[in-house]
Image (tube, helix red, strand yellow):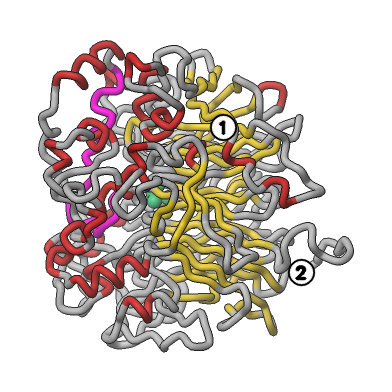
Amino acid sequence: MTDLPMPRDLPEIEDTGRSNPDPRRPIGELIAERLSRRAALGGLAAAALASAAEAAPAPATRAHDVGDAADAGPSTLRFPELRHRYSQRDSVAEGHEIQTLIRWGDPLFADSPAFDPLKQSAASQARQFGYNCDFLAVMPPVRPGTAPAPAPAPTQVDRAVLWVNHEYTNTNLMFPGLGAGPQARGRITAEQVQVELMAHGGSVVEIRREAGRWRYVRGARLNRRITAQTPMRISGPAAGHPRMRTNADPAGTRVLGMVNNCAGGTTPWGTVLTCEENFNFLFGGAAAETGDQAAAYRRYGITANPPYSWHRHVGRFDLDQEPNEPNRFGWVVEIDPYDPESTPVKRTAIGRFKHECCTHAVAKDGRVAFYSGDDERFEFVYRFLTARPWNPTDLAANRDLLDEGTLSVAKFEADGTLRWLPLVQGQGPLGPENGFHNQGDVVIEARRAATLLGATPMDRPEDVEANPVNGRVYVALTNNGRRTAQQVDAANPRAGNIHGHILELTPSGGDHAAPTATWTVFIAAGKPGVDPGTQYHRATSDQGWLSCPDNVAFDSKGRIWIATDGAPGAAGVADGLYAADTAGVGRALTRLFYQAPAGAEVCGPILTTDDRTLFLAIQHPGEERGSTYETPTTRWPDFTPGMPPRPSVIAIVRRDGGVIGG
Ligand code: FEO
Ligand code: CA
Ligand code: CA
């Protein structure tokens, strides 16, 4: 998602981008300041981007606007490229078809009530598909390793188990009568807050393709809702830590729910990893400024008066009642989608920050590397490496593999080297002198530990994902308009980087366990010839340039599919999905394949293993200036009078049944 988990017309609740207060200053100076200064950070950002929604919305039309069949040039992706535009409707390259798979409020279970946005309750939302879908995992229909005989690779995938994150709530678009703007969150009732809790989390849902059309299976055996109230276990070095203990959980080992789950990943042993990102906006209270943990709160962007009102209605989100509750969020959660009764586990060894993702790549010796971005301006890229190899023949033996390993943070050297710096208590500056008495301290305050080690502050790390064909790791850095000329470095080379860039890492020796890698810029986004410092294939068209790369996926040929979040709508550019070769003469020639409806970002791109279906999560449609429940700037995807926009998962197939993108 955007790092602004709220409508884009609300500059006063934009993240400060100052949790890492001054990434280019000497570390000693930072420490001294941290010890002496308790003053709140300065005012929130004042500048607002004009939204395209201020212009008159485009008239509704059923037709998808498609571009001409542009010359694909040297690209292996032969689809006719779309034209940039901004519309209430979404669009896909000609020859392809958009199928709405599941929408906010759709009933998951036989006894789920039908969706009625005027009659929402916590009980109904808990049985329905949640809000603001983000990360998608498409898993085999049966648990890997349990099929009676090795099944041949399917020529056409037509069944799957789908995992979906539900990242956050657009209060003013969910409930009637709240108006626009940040005031909407302050006006909601305690009952509506309970609905929001149930709209967070994730969904497991079985899906099928029948007669060429994908649909979800209501009442399927594996269907499950996980919410901000689902009991979870805490494991790893922070489990039981004094700073994890609350009145409801004096042992510090159990927590209710997960929130703000943005992107994620999977494991080789068939579980899902779902990542808590902007949890800070849900906690509030005077202790943010006066409490014992004020400095730590500040490093994670926790404030006394957050934009959401949960802390006024639910005691555990009130810092003055439960000062440790926020320490129990910001983690990677492992979920077994094949067992609806299983208890999700927060794996604290992977560190606590605003996790965008947690994607895996197997090292040469069978240990597994998990890559994460911390999505905030001037935050870092991380890698967790398991202590032991994974066991492909006994999947249950991997059950607690994520509890032991080494968390490292990336330092990008100007010579094109990347060094992974281990966050290990007792090593270097991570000792008692800096408040790190055990590894629990380190993972709870992973950001501060990484700063002390000298990690490279990045331009908002989003997806970090290995390409299974070439073994390289792609780091989407979505933007950082606040980087100054004095703060640029080789890996973040542009001041005022409003369009972002993508780095390409090559692990040393091709081994994801190596302590080093080399890196290069894959693309630097923005409009060529207009924005400074852009970098693409020189044949990239006027339609193929992009802004704000967020999540990426790879098809079986190793081509990259790039979803965006933050395109300049005012300039007539919607967020979308772009594809490019990563090798050969078409390398880095991005081409526009799909455009989102007004206000939405594109999330969770994933292709089936046969490359014949592409799933996308379309998040926060209608999230624009002035948009309200009654008069949203789009009613995508239903376009039914009275029905608000509904975040939805879509399936894209080719009309001739062929491979997506050609
Ligand atoms: Fe939720 Fe980093 O986007
Ligand atoms: Ca994201
Ligand atoms: Ca984002």
Point out which mark residue 3 bears.
none
Q: Residues within 10 Å of mark 1 (few under 14, many from 20)?
A: many
Q: Amino acid at mark 1?
A: Glu
**Residue shown at the point (71%, 32%) measured from the top left:** 363
* Secondary structure that dominates the magenta span: loop
User: Where, by quadrant of the figure, is residue 238 drawn?
Assistant: top left
Determine whether the residue tagged by mark 2 lies in a helix, strand or loop.
loop
* Residue that numbered label 1 is attached to: 504
* Residue that numbered label 2 is attached to: 156
Q: Position of residue 481 (x, y in %)?
A: 28, 36
User: Where, by quadrant of the figure, is residue 190 drawn?
Assistant: bottom left
Q: Amino acid at mark 2?
A: Gln
Q: Considering only vertical position in the picture, is 517 above or below 549?
A: above
For residue 526, say whether it is visible: no
Q: Nearer the viewer, residue 172 or 227?
A: 227
Residue 16 on the magenta segment: yes
* Direction from residue 550 to residue 48 in the image, left or right: left
For residue 612, say whether it is visible: yes
User: How many numbered marks appear?
Assistant: 2
* Direction from residue 250 to residue 143 in the image, left or right: right
Q: Residues within 10 Å of mark 2 (few under 14, many from 20)?
A: some
Please report the bounds of the magenta region as a residue range: 3-24
User: Where, by quadrant of the figure, is residue 310 drawn?
Assistant: bottom left
Residue 596 on the magenta segment: no
Q: Considering only vertical position in the picture, is 646 above or below 70?
A: below
**Residue shown at the point (55%, 76%) measured from the top left:** 99
Q: Nearer the viewer, residue 620 or 57?
A: 620
Q: Position of residue 154 (x, y in %)?
A: 80, 66
Q: Position of residue 211 (x, y in %)?
A: 69, 84
Q: Position of residue 128 (x, y in %)?
A: 43, 77
Name which of mark 1 and mark 2 comes first in the sequence. Answer: 2
